Amino acid sequence: MGLAAPVLTRDAERFAAATEAFLLANPVEHNIVYTVLDGVRQSGGEARFGWVEEDGAIAGAVLRTPPRGMLASTMSEAAARALMPALLEEDPELPGVGGPEPAATYLAQAWRTQTGGTFGRGIGHVVYVLDRVEPPAQPPPGGARLGTPDERDLLVRWTAEFAREAGITGADAAAMVDGGLAAEHLWVWDDGGPVAMTGRFVPVDGVVRISQVYTPPEARRRGLGSALVAAVSERLLAAGARRCTLNADRENLSTNAIYQAIGYRRAGDVQEYTFGG
């Protein structure tokens, strides 16, 4: 049978029905795609979806929430080549792609083949997973707790600064904080008041992704982020998560070392590409 013709849709429920089992089969590699899909299903926001099957099974899936670039699942080079012509016909101004390697590279190369354009290498992340926390030997004063509505303005400011430092474009800091507070997904380290922040997403087959880890510049180098991530990870595992996962900027050696010190182990890589030329 081989690869079938790609299917494109703007219907989140149709995409979920077709691809959910495929995405859940790899809850670490597909965590970002799945949690973004979950957000679209909850909010009803604009999104574009596509997938391709091989021998009756899903071979690759993508989604995009404009104006952001496309997010990809794992897939073969052949699946990427099959998807790209249909994606460009539907979305000729596709700005870029991000996803697990080597799928992201396969899609960028397929885009170049179709358009003759050039693409640039964007931010690369290491994917980490953890199933047992190694708490910091000397944690800083204070402790982890959920963020509260009266801290909203501070958390919005921190989230905007986090997005800027992380190179995240199109982030709606206010919406991220409001959603996180409502779902009890935002945590702070409290030492006479909030001094650091992190967030988490819905579980994907028992795997919970931690993100939005931010300590303001004046409070850094005190171990606050490390202690907060360790405490939140431990509580998520105690509450039933099988594993925790997070992504760290590949070039930030200090951050990578901090996560490894509390028990996170490398599980793969995620790469972003920007299209142009």
Image: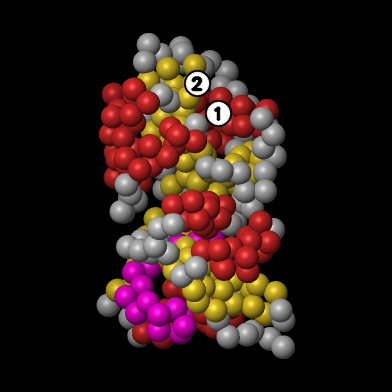
Q: Residue furthest bottom?
A: 1
Q: Which circle marks residue 62 in the picture?
A: none
Residue 217, percent from left and from top:
30, 29
Residue 272 drawn above or below residue 241: below
Residue occupying the point 56% across, 55% down: 34
The segment highlighted magenta reads: 84-104
**Sequence-earlier tag: 1 or 2:** 2
Q: Is residue 235 left or right of residue 105?
A: right
Residue 272, percent from left and from top:
42, 61
Residue 259 drawn above or below residue 70: above
* Whether label 1 touches label 2, CB < 8 Å: yes
Quadrant in the picture for the C terminus: bottom left
Residue occupying the point 63% across, 69% down: 18
Q: Quadrant of residue 128?
A: top right
- Viewer-proximal residue among 70 and 127: 70
233 in magenta: no
- Viewer-proximal residue among 125 and 155: 155
